[in-house]
Image (cartoon, rainbow, N blue to C red):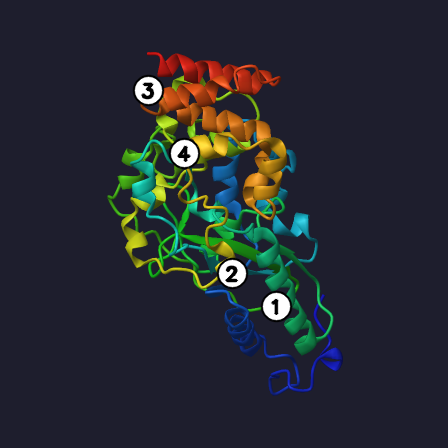
């Protein structure tokens, strides 16, 4: 589906024979992306064969846990042309989210009375923001070359976004399975624009983890079972966000005061000393989620939970799992009358999920 020069903008860069100059167009796309607020833009092809083998073995071992959506789309995740027929190139973008105004992460983790929320979830949900900007980028391309085939994604479809970003030169997949950039660490979101344009591709980034195993050693629940191998079933982010049922008792102590996600493997990563604070005010903390106590948040009823998490990624887990997670964190807190009283108020909760975790927490409080 090659765009017709007749339908393109008069200022579209062209080669000597009148065809679209796709190398020049690629440079413009990267400039437009930065103008729209993305920190980096890269371009890759659609060959993800090596990553498909890794995905298959990971799924075969059941390391995805209850995340059935990882397998239900078959190989569309690693074969972009099956997800969107006609796809020839993928424009990959990076958007930094480190919230400078937030309370220092280690200070929260070191205070068992406080609730730790993953840095990416402190502010507004990123999905709509990234997708809206990708749409604006597509609109600029359409204005330049005329109608073309495309679709925008941001963690919203079966896409191997980290593998694509690595091929596009945005970073490499570290031993903790997050993407790392040499110049800015790993505190960023990714988005993709699948296109049918034959754009020149960027050079893939190479691995720079070396002998470092800091992320493996720091994981509170031992979820990084080998370099570049994550057992999601043990990961605190999975346990507090993806898992719908009870959190396995053997893993509850390791959760500490983390009630939504976990950042330990990123906080310890030496490459994050190069990370930069985001300029996006939407990613700054809302509802004091960077400094609230566990007891404060545990007192939210469902209406308060929905009101306080409006526009937040946290809302997706619902009020029951919110209470489940905080009950575990309260059980991990030092014994106190105040904690016991807060737990007692939820002891007769109609949800068996909440009831069981509250009882466990009370047992921990009473030794």
Which residue corresponds to the image point at 26% horizontal and 47% vertical from the top-left?
Answer: 210
Identify the disc placed on residue 258: 4
| Mark 4 vs 3, N-terminal side | 4
Q: Nearer the viewer, residue 83 or 320?
A: 320
Task: Identify residue for label 1.
Answer: 137
Residue 233 vertical position relative to residue 293 in the rendered view, above or below: above
Residue 39 vertical position relative to residue 114 in the rendered view, above or below: below
Contact between labelled residues 1 and 3, with CB atoms less than 8 Å apart? no
Q: 317 left or right of 260?
A: right
Q: Position of residue 227 (x, y in %)?
A: 34, 37
Q: What element carries label 2?
A: strand
Residue 284 vertical position relative to residue 217 in the rendered view, above or below: below
Counting every numbered tag in the picture gives 4
Q: Residues within 10 Å of mark 4 (few under 14, many from 20)?
A: many
Q: Which of 100 and 305 is in front in this view?
A: 305
Q: Which of 41 and 148 is in front in this view?
A: 41
Contact between labelled residues 3 and 2, with CB atoms less than 8 Å apart? no
Q: Residues within 10 Å of mark 2 (few under 14, many from 20)?
A: many
Which residue corresponds to the image point at 45% horizontal and 64% vertical from the top-left?
Answer: 279
Q: Is mark 1 on a helix, strand or loop?
A: helix
Between the C-alphas of marks 2 and 4, the distance is: 29 Å
Between the C-alphas of marks 2 and 1, the distance is: 11 Å
Between the C-alphas of marks 2 and 3, the distance is: 46 Å
Task: Identify residue for label 3.
Answer: 335
Identify the disc placed on residue 93: 2
| Mark 2 vs 3, N-terminal side | 2
Between the C-alphas of marks 4 and 3, the distance is: 17 Å
Between label 2 and label 4, give the one nearer the viewer: 4
| Mark 3 vs 1, N-terminal side | 1
């Amino acid at each position: 589906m090659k765009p017709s020069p007749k339908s393109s903008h008069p200022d579209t860069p062209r080669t000597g024979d009148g065809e679209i100059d796709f190398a020049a167009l690629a440079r413009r796309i990267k400039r437009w992306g930065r103008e729209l607020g993305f920190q980096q833009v890269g371009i890759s092809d659609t060959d993800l064969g090596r990553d498909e083998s890794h995905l298959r073995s990971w799924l075969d071992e059941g390391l995805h846990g209850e995340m059935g959506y990882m397998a239900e789309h078959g190989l569309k995740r690693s074969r972009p042309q099956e997800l969107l027929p006609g796809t020839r190139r993928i424009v990959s973008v990076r958007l930094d989210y480190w919230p400078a105004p937030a309370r220092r992460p280690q200070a929260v983790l070191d205070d068992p009375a406080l609730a730790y929320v993953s840095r990416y979830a402190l502010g507004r949900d990123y999905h709509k923001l990234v997708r809206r900007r990708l749409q604006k980028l597509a609109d600029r391309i359409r204005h330049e070359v005329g109608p073309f085939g495309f679709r925008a994604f941001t963690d919203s479809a079966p896409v191997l976004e980290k593998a694509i970003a690595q091929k596009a030169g945005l970073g490499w997949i570290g031993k903790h399975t997050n993407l790392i950039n040499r110049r800015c660490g790993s505190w960023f979101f990714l988005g993709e624009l699948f296109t049918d344009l034959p754009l020149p591709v960027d050079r893939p980034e190479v691995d720079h983890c070396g002998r470092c195993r800091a992320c493996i050693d720091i994981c509170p629940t031992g979820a990084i079972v080998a370099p570049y191998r994550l057992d999601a079933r043990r990961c605190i982010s999975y346990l507090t966000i993806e898992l719908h049922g009870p959190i396995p008792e053997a893993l509850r102590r390791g959760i500490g005061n983390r009630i939504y996600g976990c950042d330990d493997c990123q906080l310890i990563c030496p490459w994050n000393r190069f990370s930069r604070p985001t300029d996006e005010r939407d990613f700054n903390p809302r509802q004091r989620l960077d400094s609230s106590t566990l007891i404060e948040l545990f007192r939210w009823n469902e209406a308060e939970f929905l009101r306080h998490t409006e526009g937040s990624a946290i809302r997706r887990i619902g009020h029951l799992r919110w209470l489940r997670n905080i009950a575990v964190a309260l059980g991990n807190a030092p014994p106190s009358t105040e904690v016991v009283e807060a737990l007692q108020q939820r002891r007769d909760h109609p949800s068996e999920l909440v009831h069981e975790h509250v009882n466990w927490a009370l047992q921990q409080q009473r030794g």
